[in-house]
Amino acid sequence: MINETPRVRFAPSPTGYLHVGGLRTALYNYLFAKKNNGTFVLRIEDTDRNRYVEGAVENLIKALMWAGLNFDEGPETGGNYGPYMQSQRLDIYKKYADELIEKGKAYYCFCTPERLKTLKEEQEKQKLPQAKYDKHCLHLSKKEIENNLNAGIPKVVRLNVEGNNTIKFDDIVREHVEFESNNVDDQVLIKSDNYPTYHLANVVDDHLMKITHVIRGEEWLSSTPKHVLLYDAFGWERPIFAHLPLLLNPDRSKLSKRQGDVAVEDYRDKGFLKDALVNFVALLGWNAGDDKEFYYMDELISRFTLERVNKAGAVFDLQKLNWLNAEHLRKKSIEELLNLLKDEIQKSEFKNQNYSDNYLKLIIEAMKERVSFIKEFIDTCTYFYVTPAEYEQKSIEKNWKPETPEHLNKLKQEFALLNNPTKEDFEHALAKVSEEINVGKGKLIHPLRLAVSGQSTGPGMFDLLFILGKDEVVKRIETAIKNISV
Ligand code: GLU
């Protein structure tokens, strides 16, 4: 058992964006490190040169920072175990591959792609459970190997997996795991382009970076026997493993792009709050043993344990994310919401307008219980930002009667007399007109709402009038009378 303070890592391959599954892995590593005063390392696994994407690492770091997952060591940040980009560590992998070859735990393979293809086809014909390399090159003589190397024949380095052996390891989530070595291929460790494969680089780096706990997605469970063989071959202590459950679509298929967004950046751009996304992702495979669902990061840190991670796949339920977003939004202070709303206005068509902080705060208070996203403080009530250019047709048909212009004119005149009116002043003025002309309040309120907002729903009528202010209300009534014809 490893007793020192934990060192964990998030080790993504830079694909160009941060997958929500990657965010979950990064988050669990982060929570585990913070809870146990450990170290959270970011290591970039960029040894697949075919998959290189310009700007991918920057994007990834940006997305992690947005979510609040600051790492202690990593590219840019540095640390005692760098470099933290695998493409900058090629010499290290070569040295360790050579060590394995010397020990007889790995060997050069010079087989041509054609031979490997034929071998695979033959094995498929024989209906073997899985195609495996036949160890042909393990039996080359020293002389043959030397000649091939001198002649510059393309080569890879393979792991020498001994057959008829049960590979066993423990996993905090999966408990005791066993794989038959007969089912494990002689995995390539160094490719013909001299780059290591994931397996070698991952194990060498986890060892050299003193990683104590490997916390990663379940899709890597089947790679773990190969890793265990590598640790044993080097004579290194194995880290503690914890494989996190798969993320599933609501139909229980594996979470895929086809059924919705999978990039953290997409959720960010759609206006989800980082607190809500982090809260949601934390619950994808973990709970504290009760039914609490609303969390801030600091509570997650104090309550998180790997022991409470589930085995069963976790369903990605967008409705729950929407709900959490609304909950987090409602718990924010007016000042926080004001800042978020100002940022949102900068992204909107109203960016060149000038709204005072006080005005925006009134909008926030009126709309807070009615919205789930910051951008809805704009989209669902654009009438706070601009005079309505259109009026809801259905409401016109229902509420705009031949006598309506006359009623609204009366209201307008009464409002115009008010001096710096409060919400109550508007209310009294409307009651007064209602009595004078003997028309029910409801008959006045519906067309009035339509006239000032263009809509039939929204915050309380008198809140709406108060926020817009007397002059604007008067102006809008006049405009509506001119523009609405039935
Ligand atoms: N590079 C792997 C990935 O893209 C890392 C898996 C692991 O954590 O070992 O997820």
Image (cartoon, helix red, strand yellow):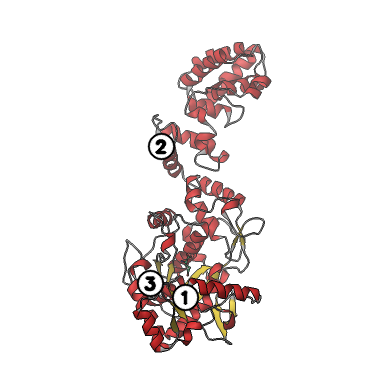
Q: Position of residue 163 (x, y in %)?
A: 56, 86
In the figure, 441 relative to 232: above or below? above
Helix, strand or loop under label 1: strand
Compute the Cα span from label 3 to label 2: 49 Å
Q: Nearer the viewer, mark 3 or mark 2?
A: 3
Q: Which residue is mark 2?
A: 346
Compute the Cα span from label 2 to label 1: 52 Å
Q: Residues within 10 Å of mark 1 (few under 14, many from 20)?
A: many
Please tell me which residue is depicted at 54% across the width and 36% down the height of the picture.
367
Instruction: Give the mark nearest the N terminus, 2 or 1.
Output: 1
| 133 with respect to 341 (left or right) | right
Q: Nearer the viewer, residue 218 or 98?
A: 98
Q: Nearer the viewer, residue 375 or 329?
A: 375
Mark drawn on residue 194: 3
Q: Nearer the viewer, residue 15 or 433?
A: 15
Compute the Cα span from label 3 to label 1: 11 Å
Q: Which residue is mark 1?
A: 188
Q: Tag 2: residue type?
A: Gln
User: Which of the 4 quarters of the picture holds residue 182?
Assistant: bottom right
